[in-house]
Amino acid sequence: MKNSKFLNNIICSDALELLSQIENDSIDVVLTDPPYFLDKLDNNWDYDEVSNQNNQQVVTSLPAGMKFDREQGRKFYTWYLKISEEIFRVLKPGGFFFSFSSPRLYHRMASAIDDAGFEIRDSFMWLYTQNQAKAMGVDHFINKMNADEKDKEEIKEKLSGWKTPQIKSCFEPIAMAQKPTSQTYLNNMLKYEVGLFNTNVRIGDDNMYPANVFTVESINELIDKTFLLPKPTKKEKGEYNDHKTVKPLAICEYLIKLSVFSKNAVVLDPFVGSGTTAMAAKKLGKNYIGIDVNEKYVKISEKRLREIDEKPDLFITVMDIEKREKRSFQEQLQIA
């Protein structure tokens, strides 16, 4: 089997170095959450530096991701174009590439994927309500102005509530790209077993047709009815898992269910982090290859993957539990 030494393993390596060792046309789906290249979060980011930085000094030590710098997008594009070209090479014809991003740099990511030869087929939106407000007030600048205190207070009052243009971000975009098919979709599917979407997959409380918007938290009746995916349990992440951006298992499962057909399919994540993509593939009976440059995260991924076999109940979703309880209640009514 192709890539046998990498199959169903998490490899500690630089993504570009490891991708170069993966065989051509051998991967069904790539699903990944790459570094976003916001402040201190590029491909060389250091976990301890980002986590332990002093955020008390205003402006000079902003939390990672709040600093605006036009070079971030340019650097991200240049780096991700190389990544996307390697992913293009390793994917089978018709293979899918799902890539998370921040709203601000999504256009750079999508352009890199497009320029690597992919067809941008759609954009998914992960909708949520909880996130850090990133806007910053200007009182500290006013305090440093060469003006008397009365004038400063008048300016503060006049600009009360006016902050830097960074409102609370409540969604993550996900590029959905496809390597061009060989001949027709049908011919490609018969030859490579990839290239079509499984529209038998359902979403929302009312089992709706799959959509490019989803959420894993209850928002209101209409959104829950149409876009809700199974809610992550409290134990799903793992108490030992201190990764900053752990993706809900249900989201990765949803995207894999939509796009993976072959029983022997391989799902690749070149920035696997704490392993959610690999876990979703394993839960669904698919092969996976995970890559991460951080040895700490590799160990966390391996532990979470072991727990799927050792503690499967940890990864039963809240929705699964609710359905099981509802089914049990209905069975009791029938017996009565």
Image (cartoon, rainbow, N blue to C red):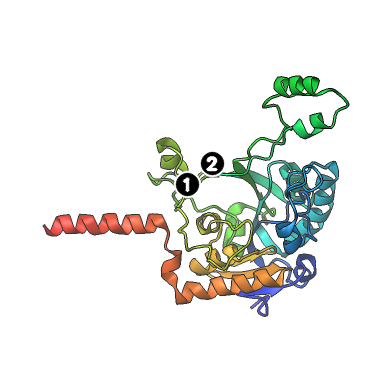
Depth order, front residue of 234/324: 234
Left or right for 304, reference 327: right
CB under 8 Å between discs 2 and 1? yes
Which residue, given by chain and number where applicable, does mark 2 sit on? 129
Q: Residues within 10 Å of mark 2 (few under 14, many from 20)?
A: few
Identify which residue is drawn at 45% across, 58% down: 233
Left or right for 95, reference 46: left
Provide the secondary structure element on which disc 1 rests: loop
Identify which residue is drawn at 68% across, 42% down: 103
Identify which residue is drawn at 45% across, 48% down: 203
Name which residue type carries label 2: Thr
Q: In this view, does 179 lie above or below 67?
A: below
Depth order, front residue of 128/259: 128
Name which residue type carries label 1: Glu
Residue 250 placed where, x, y %? 50, 56
Identify which residue is drawn at 75% across, 68% down: 19
Depth order, front residue of 4/254: 254
Which residue, given by chain and number where applicable, does mark 1 sit on? 217
Residue 292 placed where, x, y %? 70, 67
Provide the secondary structure element on which disc 2 rests: loop
